[in-house]
């Protein structure tokens, strides 16, 4: 005698609806997470660009300061200050002073 086989268990439409609902919720949650991460990434990228621009500006200032330092240490600058502020002259130069008042 053969045993009567049980009919295959069919999924009810209600089960599929629940699975579909959770899949949609899952994908929405993933999309929201990715969207927020992209927003944060955009902010950090913009901040990095601003910092790189500031670095460039500071490097230009530093180069200018180095040029000024080089000039202030040059013989040309020392001679200029000695002539203008201290009234010194080079050897064998003749200094003319105009005492006439206008």
Image (cartoon, helix red, strand yellow):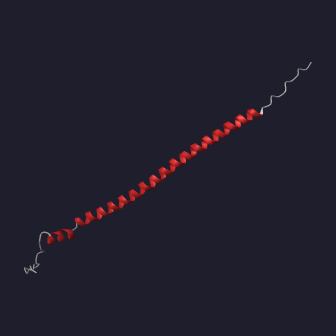
Q: Residue at x 41, y 58 (%)?
A: 53
Where is residue 19 drawn, in percent x and y?
70, 35
Residue 75 position within the rendered picture, expressed as x and y whole percent measured from the top left: 20, 69
Above or below, 31 relative to 90: above
For the view shown, which residue lies furthest in the right direction?
1
| Residue 91 falls left or right of residue 36 | left
Q: Tell me the quarter of the image containing the C terminus.
A: bottom left
In the picture, which quadrant includes the N terminus?
A: top right
Q: Nearer the viewer, residue 18 or 2?
A: 18
Q: Identify the image quadrant of residue 2.
A: top right
In the rendered view, does 89 fall on the left or right side of 65? left
User: Outermost residue toward the top?
Assistant: 1
Residue 70 lies in quadrant: bottom left
- In the rendered image, which quarter is residue 6 located in? top right
Q: Residue at x 48, y 50 (%)?
A: 43
Residue at coordinates 85% horizontally, 27% vertically from top-left? 7
Report the number of numbered marks.
0
Q: Position of residue 13 (x, y in %)?
A: 77, 34
Q: Is residue 99 above or below residue 70?
A: below
Look at the picture and state if 15 lies above or below 101. above
Front-lying residue, 83 or 13: 13
Q: Residue at x 60, y 40 (%)?
A: 29
Give left or right: position of 79 versus 18: left
Percent across and percent down for residue 22 are 67, 36
Tell me: 98 left or right of 32: left
Looking at the picture, tell me which residue is in the foreground, 3 or 94.
Answer: 3
């Amino acid at each position: 005698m053969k045993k009567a086989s049980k009919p295959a268990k069919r999924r009810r439409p209600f089960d599929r609806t629940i699975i579909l609902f959770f899949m949609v919720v899952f994908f929405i949650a993933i999309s929201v997470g990715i969207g927020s991460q992209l927003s944060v990434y955009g902010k950090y990228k913009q901040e990095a660009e601003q910092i790189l621009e500031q670095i460039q500006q500071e490097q230009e200032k530093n180069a200018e300061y180095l040029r000024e330092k080089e000039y202030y240490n040059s013989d040309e600058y020392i001679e200029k200050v000695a002539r203008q502020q201290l009234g010194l002259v080079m050897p064998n130069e003749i200094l003319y002073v105009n005492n006439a008042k206008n």
